[in-house]
Amino acid sequence: MQIKTESLFNSLPINESEEANIASDSNVHFSSSKDLWYTPQKFYESLDAKYHFTLDVCATSDNAKCDRFLTKEMNGLSHKWEGRCWMNPPYGRGIGAWISKAYQESLEDYCEVVVCLIPSRTDTAWWHDYVMKGNIEFIRGRLKFGDSVNSAPFPSAIVIFGGNK
């Protein structure tokens, strides 16, 4: 396991003020009432420049980051994740299944790498069971997801599974 606290993400525009970090829906960190957090485009582009993603495994038709993508209706958990995969999973109670799948797929020959944008929930079982097996990059500050005015009410991390093939 490799953990980085300084990375390319330090130079990305993230509003770190205390006031901006207080979102109007601050209970979302503790519930699964909102589990879709659309990836900030510039943030994704910085990762895509490094990893050259070929498959978005958790997309909607209007926010897919790759030409090849899997939607909720397709049930990405039931498909092979081939190539260089991007994952920004639903952040609700089912996130553990997505993290498990990302790790398991990264072990397969057909999967080159899985890069995951996830909430930094270091106290959860899925974090200890799977995330700790990957390379972790903690993101300084809090991201603004989608077209949100406020930053997320939780810290985020990038986890990279595979990539050593």
Image (cartoon, rainbow, N blue to C red):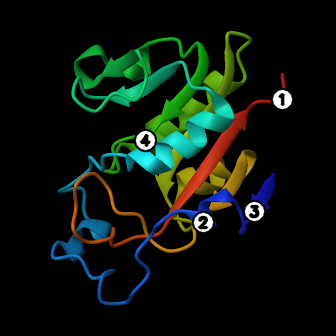
- Where disc 2 sits, the SS reads helix
Q: Residue at x 67, y 58 (%)?
A: 8
* 31 and 69: which is toward the camera: 69
| Residue hosting label 3 | 4
The amino acid type found where label 2 is placed reads Ser
Any part of residue 101 in sight: no
What is the quadrant of the C terminus in the image?
top right
- Where disc 4 sits, the SS reads loop
Q: CA distance from mark 3 to mark 2?
A: 15 Å
| Residue hosting label 2 | 11
- Where disc 1 sits, the SS reads loop
Q: CA distance from mark 1 to mark 2?
A: 26 Å
- Give the quarter of the image for residue 115: top right
- Kindly indicate whether the residue at mark 4 contacts the one at mark 1 (C-beta within 8 angstroms): no
The amino acid type found where label 3 is placed reads Lys
Any part of residue 4 in sight: yes
| Residue hosting label 4 | 88
Q: Residue at x 72, y 68 (%)?
A: 6
Q: Residue at x 37, y 30 (%)?
A: 58
For label 4, count other residues whose C-alpha is less than 10 Å away and answer few (under 14), some (14-19) or many (20+). Answer: many
The amino acid type found where label 4 is placed reads Asn
For label 3, count other residues whose C-alpha is less than 10 Å away and answer few (under 14), some (14-19) or many (20+). Answer: few
Query: x, y percentage for residue 92?
Result: 31, 50
The amino acid type found where label 1 is placed reads Asn
